[in-house]
Amino acid sequence: MGREEKATSIAELREKLGDARGAVLTDYRGLSVADITELRTLLRKSAVEYKVVKNTLAKLAVKDTGLSGLAAYLEGPTAIAVSRTDPVAASKAVTAWAKGRQTFSIKGGVVEGRIVGPAEIASLADLPSREVLLARMAGVFQAPLQGLLQVLAAPLQGLVGVLDEVRKQKEGAA
């Protein structure tokens, strides 16, 4: 790889990581070509790009940026899953695919510009989707209003019950 190719590769990786809302660094040691192809196909469905990188070039790409802490994770064979749209898409897809595969490991990553370790990546993968979280929040906001409505409706329901009993008694007497 010539000097110009290296400079281009460094600039491209710096741009990808700079634009990324979420990225996961993985150790792909022991995976077959078929396994990596399967992983790439799964990631593509989630709009995540998966690329094998050279550690020296990746360290140069993150040097003097807000992501310089990633250099600690750039040891051994490294591939990066980058998501430009959803901060947890890469975490979810990679973690789901990694279950049951001892040779594949997650080294760390970036979420919304913050460097996180493998434990945080796993925690993010366990979070429900954004839509589910929004639905839960709507339910939380709706619950007090629903309780207030029930409290306000209770006297009217009691009145209806009393009037219904009076009607039954008058029908029985007639």
Image (spheres, helix red, strand yellow):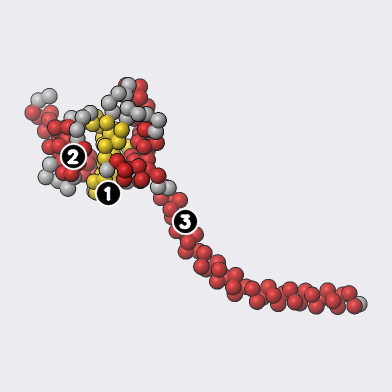
Which residue corresponds to the image point at 81% horizontal and 76% vertical from the top-left?
A: 167
| Residues at marks 3 and 2, CA–CA distance in whole angstroms | 37 Å
Secondary structure of the residue carrying tag 1 is loop
Q: Image check: 160 left or right of 28?
A: right
Does 89 appear above or below 155?
A: above
Q: Amino acid at mark 2?
A: Ala
Residue 102 visible, this orientation = yes
- Please identify the quarter of the rendering in which residue 25 is found: top left
The numbered disc on residue 72 is 2
134 displayed left or right of 31 = right
- Counting the numbered discs, the total is 3
**Which is more N-terminal, label 1 or label 2?**
2
Residue 112 marker: 1
Instruction: Indicate the amino acid at tag 1.
Output: Glu
Residue 50 position within the rendered picture, expressed as x and y whole percent measured from the top left:
29, 33
55 or 44, nearer to the observer: 55
Is the N terminus in the top left, top right, bottom left or bottom right quadrant? Answer: top left
